[in-house]
Image (cartoon, rainbow, N blue to C red):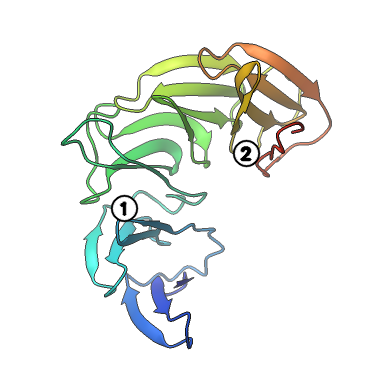
Amino acid sequence: FRLTLITNTLRCFSLKDGKELWIIKTENSLIRSQKKVSLALKNNKIIFSSTIGDLTAADVETGKLVWKSKKFGYFAARRGLLYLEPKKIGSPPRLYFSNRERLICLNAKNGKLIEDFGGDGSIRTGLNVMTPVIYKDNLIYSVDGAKQAFIVALDRNIGKEVWRFDRESNAPRKFSFTTPLLIETEAGAQVISPGSDVVHSLDPNNGELIWKVVYDGYSVIPKPIYDGKYV
């Protein structure tokens, strides 16, 4: 699959001979975009965002439109999508993504907002463009674009805040854009979240600090990696 953002066009090519199999176009944009977009492939649908801020789902085999969401702004799903299967029978699968100011939850079957989440399908987060990670029934993400940087866990179903940890950092430049890393150790689970001048390890069950390391650096973007021993 290849997405051309200037014309908001998604193309599908054969791996056997490179032949173009199908093409789908959304609305054209007059913006020459540097938007970074991830594609989500699930249940025979491919889902992507465009420069005009909507999400589109297409059938993988035919390229036919399955659904198109409302517009959420230029930054919608700029840093990826989180797809979660339901735990309850009869509940729809969900898509979570950020549009820089809000964490948004869509029904992955039809692209409509799930209004049980936050009361209108979204939660105000503050400046954040990253996609959350899932731990048990909680969505965990960091907000490092405000005066007080913090890490927060929300209930995946209704968006209620479960815990919050205020970063312990005196960084003069607070803004960073990292996705947390969840790991399992002999001592238990940890969520590793780098920010400006500091990386924190928290207990994902309650947000309590396990350890922190101070360094120099802001506008941190890379997600940490874990080899089973070192982060």
Query: Which quadrant: the N terminus?
Result: bottom left
Q: Position of residue 87 (x, y in %)?
A: 28, 31
Q: Secondary structure at mark 1?
A: loop
Residue underneath mark 2: 178
The disc labelled 2 sits on which kind of residue?
Thr
Is 171 drawn above or below residue 33 in the view shown? above
Q: Residue at x 52, y 12 (%)?
A: 206
Query: Which quadrant: the C terminus?
Result: top right
Q: Position of residue 112 (x, y in %)?
A: 22, 46
Q: Say whether residue 191 is left or right of residue 60.
A: right
The disc labelled 1 sits on which kind of residue?
Lys
Instruction: Name the mark nearer the viewer: 1 or 2.
Output: 2
Q: Position of residue 8 (x, y in %)?
A: 40, 70
The Cα atoms of the two marked residues, 1 and 2, are separated by 25 Å
Q: Say whether residue 195 is left or right of residue 205.
A: right
Taking depth in this image into account, of 190 and 172 the one nearest to the observer is: 190
Taking depth in this image into account, of 51 and 108 the one nearest to the observer is: 108
Dot 1 or dot 2: first in sequence order is: 1
Q: Secondary structure at mark 2?
A: loop
Is 152 drawn above or below residue 17 in the view shown? above
Residue underneath mark 1: 71
Within the image, what quadrant is residue 196 found in? top right
